[in-house]
Image: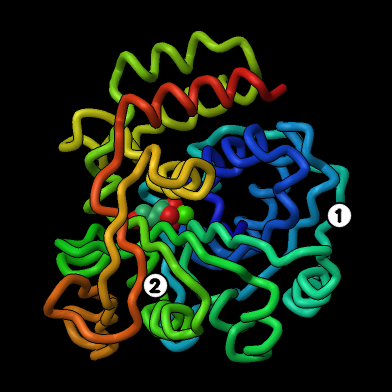
Amino acid sequence: MDVDTGIDDAVALLLVRSVLGEGLRMVSAVSGNVPVERALENTRRVLHLSGADEVPVFRGASAPLVAEPMAALWVHGEDGLGGVELEPSPAPPAGGLDELRAALEREPAPVALLATAPLTNAALLARWDPRLFARRVERIVWMGGSWGRGNDTPAAEFNARVDPEAVHIVAGSGVPMTMVGLNATEGCPLDDGDMERIGAVATRSARLVATMLGYEGLRRVNRDFGGVVVHDAIAAATLLWPGEVTATRRYPLTVDLSHGPSYGATLTGPVATGPEVEVAVAADRVRFAQRLASALARLP
Ligand code: RIB
Ligand code: CA
């Protein structure tokens, strides 16, 4: 996974760990919701809480390829986890992108990359060693983009807006990519009933999720959706259960690199040109909520 651990990245990490166990092979942190050091620390703490200290966590890029670093502290809190204090992990970070590349090379089989953040790390790897990237990454599921309005600017979703050039590079890398954007995730909120069910699960992982999803900043940005949209966990469900939680269609993808008001817009559909990607077009809210609650019950 590639994350900018914030609240919904944390939920996605727990969901993947619960369903795949040791199939969660490695995680890299990147600058996005919070600075990369904070994302690295948050990721290690969430993995520690879920009993996953053996999963190597790498420190990735501290800034986008071209644009200036951004953050979303008003959504995720200064610490990125809605103010929840977690125990530090005893497992040291596994290194930087050099070590991540070596770890990818050592993997016995190609990996699927779940990216729930700006795509800076993936773009750097793809440009640094295109053959390694194509050989070792079999597909990418990315939470990002939107075929409609954005949530960072009117035109662009946050992960796309932070590093539009990275989206352009990764989409054009030749590795099959699925884009799980706002048009799918915003139709899949966790409502009050779902939150009660999660809060009733007697595991520390479920308690963490219930607490984080109650963070006032997150609630505020979700006030129009009838519940809390856990964007990154919906992307995780797309990878874990293909075709069961989200439906996708294949479209060309164009990323706006104009450095104007629509910088980072992801244009898909018949009007777009560029490499074809699978675009999530709908998500099953009930099925997602059920599977998330069950997954949290299986964690410590
Ligand atoms: O637009 C939602 C995305 O931006 C999520 O990945 C969230 O964590 C933020 O990074
Ligand atoms: Ca994220």
The earlier-in-sequence mark between 2 and 1 is 1
Residue 290 sits in which quadrant? top left
Position of the C terminus by quadrant:
top right
Disc sitting over residue 192 in the figure: none
Looking at the image, is 248 positioned above or below residue 176? above
Does residue 198 appear to the left or right of 86 in the view shown?
A: left
Q: Is mark 2 within 8 Å of ligand 1?
A: yes
Observer-nearest of 181 and 63:
181
Amino acid type at image mark 2: Val
Residue 289: percent from the left, percent from the top?
39, 26
State which quadrant residue 219 falls in.
top left
Residue ID for mark 1 = 92
Does any portion of residue 263 appear in the rendered image?
yes
190 vs 21, left or right, is left
Q: Please give the name of the residue rendered at 46% of the width and 68% of the height, measured from the top-left corner.
A: 118
Residue shown at 70% from the left, 48% from the top: 24
**Circle on res. 162:** 2
Q: Position of residue 258 (x, y in %)?
A: 24, 90
Q: Nearer the viewer, residue 243 or 204?
A: 243
**Number of residues whose C-alpha sits closer than 10 Å to that of mark 2, classed few (under 14), some (14–19) or many (20 or more):** many
